[in-house]
Image (cartoon, rainbow, N blue to C red):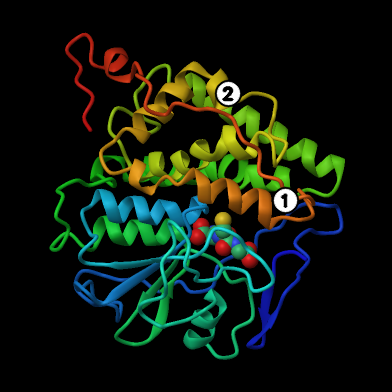
Amino acid sequence: MGLGILKDGKWISEREQEDSDGKFVRPSTTFRDKITADGSSGFKAEPGRYHLYISWACPWACRTAILRQLKGLEDVIGMSVVAAEIHDNSWEFKDEPGSTPDTVNGADYLWQIYLKADSSYSGRVTVPVLWDKQTGTIVNNESREIIRMLDTEFGDFASLDINFYPEALQDKIDETIDAIYQPINNGVYRAGFATSQGAYDEAVTDLFTALDHWEKVLGEQRYICGNKITEADWCLFTTLFRFDAVYYVHFKCNIRRIFDYPNLWNYLKDLYQYPGVKETCNLDHIKRHYYKSHPKVNPTGIVPKGPEIDFDAPHNRHRLFEKNGVKATV
Ligand SMILES: N[C@@H](CCC(=O)N[C@@H](CS)C(=O)NCC(=O)O)C(=O)O
């Protein structure tokens, strides 16, 4: 048993996900339309029209839940949350703490939503999914693009006035999201799903080289693009939040914990304590998902009890970066 896939509209409950060198390969997502404020793309930003399907376990999906929350879009864009564990039918809707039913399409499984959008769809069935109720289709299933739409196109409806893609930093934000993707966000998966020593060694080396780099950067500035919080921070946050509880053990990313990096650890607590963020952090779903959904990686499905992590502990980020008259902006 492992992760499944749709092939010409039919669900197959097991698929290969490594190449012949044992390297994990993440195929591109396929629904890539855009919502725009003026509707020029065919999908106009409107309240009540769109719905997000997410998993509290998934770092990519949680990026979108964070942006929805931090922009104050909860009453504008609906949200359904799949069950924590993946079994033969992949993501499903189930009555369990933290999850919700699919109130929009009444589906039992997420793959049914993909087939509603395209009855002959072939490919992975992933979260997040941004659904358009008006045309009955998936607008987009790529987290990075969804957060951008929530951040920049829903200004007329967002109840909180904060912009995580400020004009002066846009190139830097895009470069930074690119820079952290392969070694860090996808790097933990490349390490964890590798099936050869060489593929694992390469992934884990890339990962810790990148973490060492950002540790240094965060000694000089409060956030990864400077002293202003941006989309790039939320892209990094969802990976860092899962790191010590899951990736360190389950994916063998165990050269150091985030806790062992003074700047990254304080930065992680700083972001976690940003108002609204902890509501999107569900360690029960995260741990059950990873430890119970990858039988090739953890055949017993046993979920470790620890570690104890106090994300609410004080951090030093204001003190570090609000001295000498320089005020870090949040
Ligand atoms: N590039 C996508 C990746 C999404 C993704 O891979 N989601 C995972 C959960 S962490 C998933 O749904 N996996 C199910 C599968 O691969 O079958 C994004 O950033 O949105």
Chain-order first, disc 2 or disc 1: 2
Q: Residue sitting at 65 percent across and 33 percent down?
A: 248
Please identify the quadrant where the N terminus is shown: bottom right
- Find residue 76 and name its label: none
Query: Mark 2 — residue?
Result: 212
Give the amino acid at mark 1. Answer: Gly
Q: Is mark 1 within 8 Å of ligand 1?
A: no
Name the residue: 40% across, 26% down.
Answer: 267
Q: Are the residues flagged by discs 2 and 1 in contact, CB closer than 8 Å?
A: no
Q: Is residue 329 left or right of residue 150?
A: left
Q: Position of residue 324 (x, y in %)?
A: 21, 8
- Residue 104 falls in which quadrant of the image? bottom left
Q: Is 284 displayed left or right of 182 in the figure? A: left
Determine whether 313 is above or below 35 in the image.
Answer: above
**Comparing marks 2 and 1, which lies closer to the viewer?**
1
Q: Quadrant of the C terminus?
A: top left
Q: In x, y percent, where is residue 214? A: 50, 27
Q: Is residue 124 above or below residue 66?
A: below
Residue at the disc numbered 1 = 301
Q: Quadrant of residue 145?
A: bottom left
- Place residue 131 in its image quadrant: bottom left
Name the element at disc 1: loop
Q: Amino acid at mark 2?
A: Asp
